[in-house]
Structures are given as structure tokens and as C-alpha cells.
Amino acid sequence: MKRCLVALLLLVPLLIPVDAVAHGIWGHVHVTGWAIENLPEGELQEFFSEPEVMHAALFGAAFTDSGYWPQGGELAQRSRAYSEHTHWEPFIQDFVAWIVQNDPPPWDSLASRQRVAFLMGVASHGLQDEIFDSLFLYQIQHHDGAGQEEADPGTDGFLALDGHIRFQPTSAFLPYETLLELYEGLGAGVDRDTIERSVRVMELVYLDHANGLGVARTLGEQYKDVIPWARAHYLDPDVPGSLVAEVEPTGRYMEAIWGRLHGRTAGADPVVFAYPATPRRLRSHDASLPDSWVTFIFAAGVRYDAAVPTWVDREDEPVMFAPRNTRWGGTWPRLIRLLPEANLEPGGWYTAGLGEGVELIDGSEAVAFSHEFQVACEEGDPDDCEDLGELYVPDIGEPNPPDAGLDAAPDTDTDPDSGPDNDMGRDARDPPLDGADDVSSPDTPDPAPPTASSVKGGSCEVAADGVNWSLRRR
Ligand SMILES: [Zn+2]
């Protein structure tokens, strides 16, 4: 077993650079943890004050990618099927509907609270991928001439080099019964063994307090000179899609899910966050740069085809722009980008918005939304751009000394099968759960077909039939 572990760890630097993990898993865990720590006072902040509940969310933030880790043969297909589906809002809406129907608030048992937190973590991961891939990857492409294969492992590595890896999620809680019920509609044959084996590989190879930190540091060293702009800006709060810039939208999205779980419709407050975030300015008037994009983050998946965003200047004259889905498309994305088609006015003021009536995945219709912002002035012409003073930046904590370990996870004896999953009163005769009408993976084109190479696994427990490195751009 130990030999297997060593062999796997030696392979990790070769494995991670492929697009198997996307927006590195340490990044997901920490952006989610930071978002929870930066929640405003209130019900949701109180909910996460229980360590076991917090850790269920942190593990949920990692779980979403668990099926992309190396597996062999049919297991790889099943694992990939559940991971892909778990990324998107149709799954999140199904999960919300399941809880509302089977275990509505106030969630008196710890297992119930952990399941809700796990949902929050899973959902946060999917949103973060949409943001990072649709915004920050274009910045890296522009500045570093690189892409996801460098950005995903690189940013995880930079977190380690900079001493920001401090959460240590464990799979002590996994709501198997709920997940398996939700995955039934995939028709992919996902069973408990599929999930257990996938999670085990992820924990063994990477999400492990003894080894994962070292692996991440290695990745940081490997990529720091490959993507130097990303190295300098991956925590820049002013760059949309950086890890720190994801913290606020992740928190607002968690609050929206909390509302959905409590019967509040997403349409009543459809856009939970927008870049540029007031009072920050749009970073550039230059329409050729991703710095000129406006982005809305939604409280729930929005029917992209029906959304008609608007953009006008201060004289109410329309701005020519192209709406864009996530980088990967999707019927129910959580964001919409607005790309100007001509240069904007430096220092100019604009209003972008969305008309009322756009459908959200929870069945509600969005009320009208608008967002006023200013474009950055050109250098040397600051007359129209007053000093914004000190801007809000989420607190991500002080970095650890380079050789520090990780915070210990709470010692929990929670048996995933002892919770209300098995004591829910849910009857086999119950009708199928209502959910989104898109239970399959969203109709997104796969930008690159998976490629695979195999490595002889020998007696390796986690992949006795050899290791297939299944790649995925998420
Ligand atoms: Zn992902």
C-alpha cells in the first residue's frame, strides 16, 4: 500500500497538469472556506459555526471533482459521469428539491446539517469553476499565453507556496444515499463503490494532510515561471475570477441557496453579484481585453437562451455588446458575460442589466436588475476618477509559515449511513423527485475529447486494473 502511495505521488506532478482537477481542489476548498468565514452575521454564519458542519462544506467543495481522478475502465466512465453532473445547477436544484421534500429545515440532527453544508460546498465548487474558467482563464491566456492546464495546478501550487493552505477537509461525512438517489437519473450505473473508490483516490493522492501539501508545493515551483502574471494576480481582489475575487460571489450564492432551501425564490433577487463589484471600476475601456467585460452572477441557474441583457451609457444610448454564456456553455449557467464590441469611454459611466421575466431553474421569474458602474480612466487623466479609498477585500487569514502543517479536521464519528439518509421516512413508493428538466449533463460541447494514457498499476489498491488518466476540462 505504501509503495502504491509513493508510486502515485511520484506520478502526481505528471498527472496534475492535465485538466483533471480544474481550478485546483485546494483552491475550491479554500475559496469556499474563506467565503464561509466572510459571511455577514446572520443565520447562515451561525449555521456554519459548528466545526463538523463547516468541514462537510469544505469536503463538498472537493467532492465535485472526485470523479475526475484516475480510475480504470468502466469505473472511470461512471466516476466522470457523476462528477460532470455534480458541477451544474440542474444537480444543485435537484439536491435543493430533495432536501425541501425529504428533510426540510430546521435540520435538528447533525447529519441533516452536514448534508445541507455538503450541498453548499458542492454548489460553491460549480460556481467557482464557472467564474474561474469564464473569466480568469482568459486573463491568463492574455497575459501568460497559457491556459487551464497550467492555471489549475499552478494556482493550487501558489496557495501552498504562499502558506494559504490551512483547511483540511475529510470525507468523514458523505450523504451516500441522497447522492445515489440523485444520480439515478444519469443512468450511468453510479453506485456507492464508484463514489468510495473515486473519493479514496482523491484523498490518497492529493487531499491528504500528510502528502497533499507537498504535492501542491511541487506544482507551485513547477508553474511559477510558466504563468508569472497569474502568480502575481491569482489573489488580486481587483481581477474578476481571481481566487479572492471569487469569495464574495461564492458567499452570496450560498446565501441564495439558503434562501431556496427556505422557500424563497431565486427570481426575487436574481443577480447576487456583478463584476465590476461596486465601487470598483471596470478595469479597461479597451474592448479587446477581458478587463472590459461585465459579468452577472445569478442566485440560481438562469435559462441562458431566454436572457436578454442590456447595456446603456449615461445618456441612455445603447452599447453594442455580445452576451456570452460560461466558457463551457450550459442551458442553466450561473453567470452571463457581456462583452463590449467597441471601445468604451474611459471614465464613463454605464448601466448594464437584465429585463424582468427571465426564467430561473427553481421555476421562478427574475425581477428586473440593473448595475451602474464606471470605467477606469486612462493613465494621466484621472480627473473623472476620484480616489476610491480603501476597498473591501475578503479576509483570507494570515499565511502560514512555509513548514507549517494544516488545521486538523474535527474528530467526528458521524456514520454516513446512520443519519437521516436511512431514516428519512422516504418510501420506495414515493414519486420521483421533481427537479430540473435537464437531468443529463448540460448540452455543452466538450472542448477536447478525453485523452488517456495508462500506467501499469501493479498491486495498487486504488486501481488494480491499471490506471487510466481520464482527463476533463472542468
Ligand atoms: Zn471542478
Image (cartoon, rainbow, N blue to C red):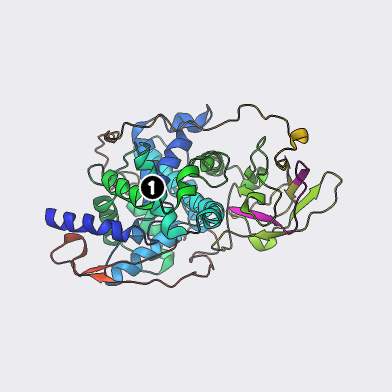
Residue 29: quarter of image: top left
> Residue at position x 47%, y 59% from top?
147
Front residue of 233 and 459: 233
Along the horizontal axis of the image, is 334 left or right of 450?
right
* Circle 1 SS class: helix
Give the vertical position of 438 relative to 50 (above or below): below
Q: Amino acid at mark 1?
A: Asp
Front residue of 387 and 109: 387
Instruction: Let me know if residue 39 appears in the view.
Output: yes
Q: Position of residue 177 (x, y in %)?
A: 34, 54
Q: How many numbered circles does the render carry?
A: 1
Instruction: Let me know if residue 429 appears in the view.
Output: no
Front residue of 123 and 165: 165
Write down the residue under mark 1: 156
Q: Quadrant of the N terminus?
A: bottom left
Identity of the residue furthest to the front in this view: 380
Give the vertical position of 101 relative to 37 (above or below): below
Q: Quadrant of the C terminus?
A: bottom left
Q: Position of residue 355 (x, y in %)?
A: 75, 52
State yes or no: residue 6 in magenta.
no
Give the vertical position of 365 relative to 443 (above or below): above
State yes or no: residue 335 in magenta.
yes
Q: Which residues are magenta?
A: 334-351
